Amino acid sequence: MFKQSMLLTLLAFMLTFQACSKDKTEDKVQDANAMISVPEYVLTGLDKKQYKVTKEMDGFLLENATGKVVIFDIFATWCPPCKASAPHISSLQKKYKDNVIVIGLNIEDNIPNAKLEEFRKNYGADYILVNSEKNRVLADAIVNELQLGDRYPIPIMALYKDGKLIKHYIGLIQEEFVESDIKKALEI
C-alpha cells in the first residue's frame, strides 16, 4: 500500500512538471518583458531627420536632449490660437537655441508636408515640425499623462527636462510665462 501511494505521488509530481513545457515558460518571460517595455515614438521632421521620444516614469524624453528643455507643442494648422502662438514659440527657440528644443506635434491625420511648410512660412513656426503617423499617438500619450481627457483643447505645450514634466499650458499663453519656466528649469 505504501509503495502504491509513493508511486501515485511520484506520478502526479511528474505529470505536474511535465505539463509546464519550455515553450510556456518562454511565453511567460516574453509577456513579462512586454509589460516592462518602454513606449518609443520615432517621428519624422520636415527636415527628414528622425526624432526618438521614449516614455519615462515622469514624462517623455527626447533622445540626445540631456540637460535641455524640450517643448512639445501639440497643434493643428487650422487652429487660430495655434497660429497665434507659433511666432512666440519660435522666439523662445531662437532665444534659447542651445538649451531648448521645440517639437511641433501636428494632430491632423495624413496632412501633406506642403501644408506644414505653409504653416511654418505664414505663422513663423521656425522650430522642428514633425509629420508622422506617430504624432497623434504621442500627442494622445502626453495629454493622457497630463490627465486632460480624450477630447482635449489645443494648443497644448508640455515642457520637459531630462524626461520630467516641468509644466504644461493649454491655449494661447504669453511668451513671458513660458520663458519664466524655461529659466527656472535651466537655473538661469
Image (cartoon, rainbow, N blue to C red):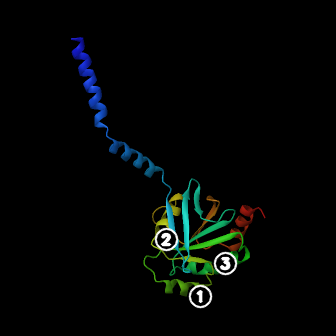
As drawn, the residue found furthest toward the top would be 1
Residue drawn at point x = 54 percent, y = 61 percent: 54
- Check contact, mark 3 vs mark 2: CB within 8 A: no
Residue drawn at point x = 29 percent, y = 26 percent: 13
Q: Quadrant of the N terminus?
A: top left
Give the crowd class for mark 3: few <14, some 14-19, many >=20 residues within 10 Å.
Answer: many
Task: Give the image location of residue 138, x and y in percent.
Answer: 50, 66
Residue drawn at point x = 59 percent, y = 54 percent: 58
Could you say which quadrant of the image residue 26 lies in? top left
Pointer 1 residue: 121
Give the crowd class for mark 1: few <14, some 14-19, many >=20 residues within 10 Å.
Answer: few
Disc nearer the start of the sequence (3/2): 3
Taking 119 as reference, is 97 above or below it?
Answer: above
Mark 1 or 3: in front is 1
Q: Secondary structure at mark 2?
A: helix
Task: Give the image location of residue 37, x and y in percent.
Answer: 48, 54
Q: Is residue 152 left or right of residue 89?
A: left
Determine the CA span between mark 1 and mark 3.
Answer: 14 Å
- Can see residue 146? no
Pointer 3 residue: 88
Disc nearer the start of the sequence (1/3): 3
| Identity, as a three-letter code, of the amino acid under mark 3 | His
Residue drawn at point x = 60 percent, y = 85 percent: 123
Q: Quadrant of the C terminus?
A: bottom right
Determine the CA span between mark 2 and mark 1.
Answer: 21 Å
| Identity, as a three-letter code, of the amino acid under mark 2 | Asn
| Identity, as a three-letter code, of the amino acid under mark 1 | Lys
Q: Is residue 12 left or right of residue 91?
A: left
Could you say which quadrant of the image residue 68 lies in? bottom right
Pointer 2 residue: 135
